[in-house]
Amino acid sequence: MDDAIKILVVDDDDSGREALSRLLSLAGYDVTSAATGESALDLIDCQQYQVIVSDLFLPDKNGFDVLQSVRKVSPASEVIVVTGHASAQSAVRAMKEGAFDYITKPIDFDELKIVVLKALEKQKLMSENKYLRQQLQGRFEFDNIIGNSPAMSLVFERMSRIVKTDSAVLVSGESGTGKELVARALHYNGTRRERPFVAVNCSAIPEALLESELFGHVRGAFTGAVKDKPGKFEAANHGTIFLDEIGTLPLHLQSKLLRVLQEHEVERVGSNKTVKFHVRVISATNSDLESMVKRGAFREDLYYRLNVIPLHLPPLRERQQDIMHLTAFFLEKQCRLLGRAPCSISKQALEALERYSWPGNVRELENLIERMIVLTDAAIINLDDVPATIVGEKPAGDMCCVKMPSGGVDLVATISRIEHSLISEALESAGGVKAKAAALLGINRTTLVEKIKRLKI
Ligand SMILES: Nc1ncnc2c1ncn2[C@@H]1O[C@H](COP(=O)(O)OP(=O)(O)OP(=O)(O)O)[C@@H](O)[C@H]1O
Ligand SMILES: [Mg+2]
């Protein structure tokens, strides 16, 4: 029944509601019913219904309240209103307020079935449309790169300048921050978008093969070279070459790469003929190239050549406000990929994600959302669905796990003891600076001073 289309029937009239529910169930829908507006809203809060069939006149709330709440809480649901009085006025109002359609009592079941089918069809078209639009735009806009934080706004701003130029870009950032995603977006939004985007992961190719991968080889250049093969630079001609994990490039190839970039021509391995090319170079690294240069592990001249425009992607823990948007984006994406009805996340679960430090950055978040969706059938991801390793990272640790002793407890004294210990520790790690300790404890300085006095710390 989990994959069945979910319909909610709201009607205070018992026999009408039961008849409607039975008929829709027989038509293959997964039907839930509610006798009041309030109970309908409770149900909508914890479950996504594709269609809601609601009477306009309910004892507690009227159908318009239900309609308005649905539009807010579950905008993807379609509402069909049922009116006992064939009042054109209320029907028009319902349509204006976002109802999909209305039907009048006594209900003609065949008519209702057709209206439900039409509502479902509209929903399907809307989601396909949205998907196609995103597919189309995804290649040419930064639409598929999510981020509202000030840090990401700066990234977008810089990207929109970069797409107008042809200069070499060095994208830096921790693993999973979106370096490859950004590199592709720069290519597909730039003037070379019709030309190839060729990615080479310098760390994934064995060192012995890397040179021929990048620059190509001629037949007989080495054992196994049975025919001439162009390298990635030639393949990317007029387009973009993306040199991923550039920090892992061995020193001897760094020299060759520098020459190739300076002269805009390559020599295939085993050949002394040169081939001209014009490519834009975007490279990426998650190591600190500057310090590698200082240590002599990366050529300084090559570093400057690649790093004409630096683009740094901040780690996810430094842009906490993006977590909400990324979560919504990945939830929508995963549900669509799995052919599931859209699902959402509870406030507490989202807060847990926001508190976590995401060492694997956006990739870790994306993988987690996928895992959570696969492991639950519910329409709303709850705190229980979030793995303990992630929830456990809340600042309070598991301090709330103090067990109630069987002989009872002196609550006030126990709380004072906990306060005493936490404040002492906070003062210690803040080096005695009260303002800093107060910040660590999430209270203001005056409150801290009062507590220090009261607890005689
Ligand atoms: N801002 C973002 N919006 C949407 N998706 C994102 C964003 N940043 C990263 N992702 C997604 O996270 C995943 C990891 O991104 P990507 O492969 O570009 O990271 P990376 O920095 O190249 O990582 P690595 O250094 O490990 O190669 C991809 O699936 C990507 O689509
Ligand atoms: Mg990458």
Image (cartoon, grey):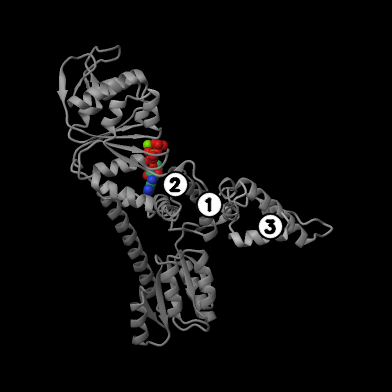
Q: Residue farthest to the right?
A: 407
Callout 3 crowding tier (Cα within 10 Å): few <14, some 14–19, many ≥20? some
Looking at numbered disc 2 in the image, what kind of residue is underneath it?
A: Leu
Front residue (pair 225, 161): 161
Mark 2 residue element = helix
Alpha carbon distance from label 1 to label 3: 28 Å
Q: Which residue is mark 1?
A: 355
Quarter containing the C terminus: bottom right
Q: Which residue is mark 3?
A: 452
Mark 1 and 3 residues: CB-CB less than 8 Å, in contact? no
Alpha carbon distance from label 2 to label 3: 36 Å
State the image quarter where residue 341 is shown: bottom left
Callout 2 crowding tier (Cα within 10 Å): few <14, some 14–19, many ≥20? many
Between discs 1 and 3, the one toward the N terminus: 1
Residue 255, image x and y in percent?
28, 21
Q: Is residue 107 visible?
A: no
Q: Which residue is mark 2?
A: 316
Looking at numbered disc 3 in the image, what kind of residue is underneath it?
A: Ile
Residue 79: assigned label: none
Give me the residue at 56% from left, 52% from top.
385
Above or below residue 230? Residue 110 is: below
Front residue (pair 46, 30): 46
Looking at numbered disc 1 in the image, what kind of residue is underneath it?
A: Arg
| Mark 1 Cβ and ligand 1 under 8 Å apart | no
Front residue (pair 374, 383): 383
Q: How many marks?
A: 3
Between discs 2 and 3, the one toward the N terminus: 2
Residue 35, image x and y in percent?
54, 77
